[in-house]
Amino acid sequence: MDAKKPYLAVILIQSIYGGMFLLSKAAFDVGMNPFVFVFYRQAAATLFLAPLAVFFEWKTAPPLSFSCFWKIFMLSVCGITLSLNIYGVALIYTSATLAAATTNCLPVITFFLAVLFGLEMVKLRTIPGLVKLTGIVICLFGAATIALYRGPYLKLLLHHHLLGHYSQQPVYVPSSKAWAKGVFLMLLSNTFWGLWLVLQGRVLKSYPSKLLSTTLQCFLSTIQSFVIAISLERDPYQWKLGWNVRLFSVAYCGVVVTGVTFYLQAWVVEKKGPVFLAMSTPLTLIFTIISSALLLGEIISLGSVFGGILLVGGLYCVLWGKSKEQQMDEGVCSRNDAEKECPISNKLVSTQRSSPFNV
């Protein structure tokens, strides 16, 4: 059961992210400022996580040095503040489906960043390594298909908007210029997100208290996001939250997404590595395509369906390659341990196996 926990965790994470895409788009559709939204979201996450962090990890947490604090500060700038604010602007230009689709470029971005930082190795001389590389190429091609090729639109029988009315008017389709701008901003947001995934592992090595680290990142991001929001939005109306989709989306994204998934992501990164977490992102697309069409009235294009199939296929190719590489590494480690315990007998067995006369 313990071996299945990371897989169950990533399924839960991606399901929560699917809800984030839908509710964020719904809040922006009613006119909420994306920078104010990010500030409230991070503030809600901080208020939710702070009591838990103090109760569970305050007594056992290691001392926080200035060097470690600076790393956490920069991690919150890149991976949370910049990523979320750019994502919010991009979502205005595009759709929830496009947001989930371009997020699937995250595996490719994270893979190259992990290789650059020496956290992943490319074993092109092995079959699992080739399969993993093929899966990454398929993921990239699938994401490019969704972003660049729309094709004919598939109309469902009902388009029910999340805000509670049936959409009888023609569904708004962004212009090609706005769509391209949104895709670029989404890719930039994912680049910062991938950098957060890669650097998260290094920060946890110097400060292993995951809950306190997550809370501190949310708190620092709240301050950073407030500076950005107050600089770009001075209208008092944009800062008001009523009993509507704005408040619900802020509470969901702050407590459930930021508060819960950020901690789960840190746990998965520690157990399985950053690329494993990034490779699970195509699961969000399946949920978002169906839900956005039924709840937000968005139309589904043939390119989205075809690209989604490619993304899921590439995902399982990469996961298969990584699992086979882990099995090979575990086999080498166990064989090395056996040689240390009984070097003479193991050398004899190795010599017999490698002998050209041994059939």
Image (spheres, helix red, strand yellow):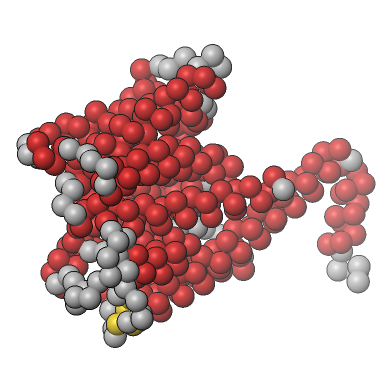
Quadrant housing the C terminus: bottom right
Vertical arrangement, residue 92 with respect to residue 196, above or below: below
Which of the pair 322/296 is nearer the observer?
A: 296
Quarter-of-image position of residue 123 = bottom right
Residue lying furthest bottom: 152
Horizontal side of 258 relative to 232 (left or right) equals right
Horizontal side of 233 relative to 145 (left or right) equals left
Residue lying furthest left: 234
x and y percent of residue 110 in the render?
A: 41, 52
Residue depicted at 87% across the width and 56% down the height: 351
Vertical arrangement, residue 89 with respect to residue 233, above or below: below
Q: Is residue 72 visible?
A: no
Which of the pair 357/102 is nearer the observer?
A: 102
Horizontal side of 30 relative to 281 (left or right) equals left
Vertical arrangement, residue 239 with respect to residue 11, above or below: above
x and y percent of residue 32 in the render?
A: 18, 48
x and y percent of residue 340 in the render?
A: 82, 39
Which of the pair 350/270 is nearer the observer?
A: 270
Residue depicted at 18% across the width and 61% down the height: 93
x and y percent of residue 151 in the render?
A: 29, 83
Horizontal side of 85 relative to 341 (left or right) equals left
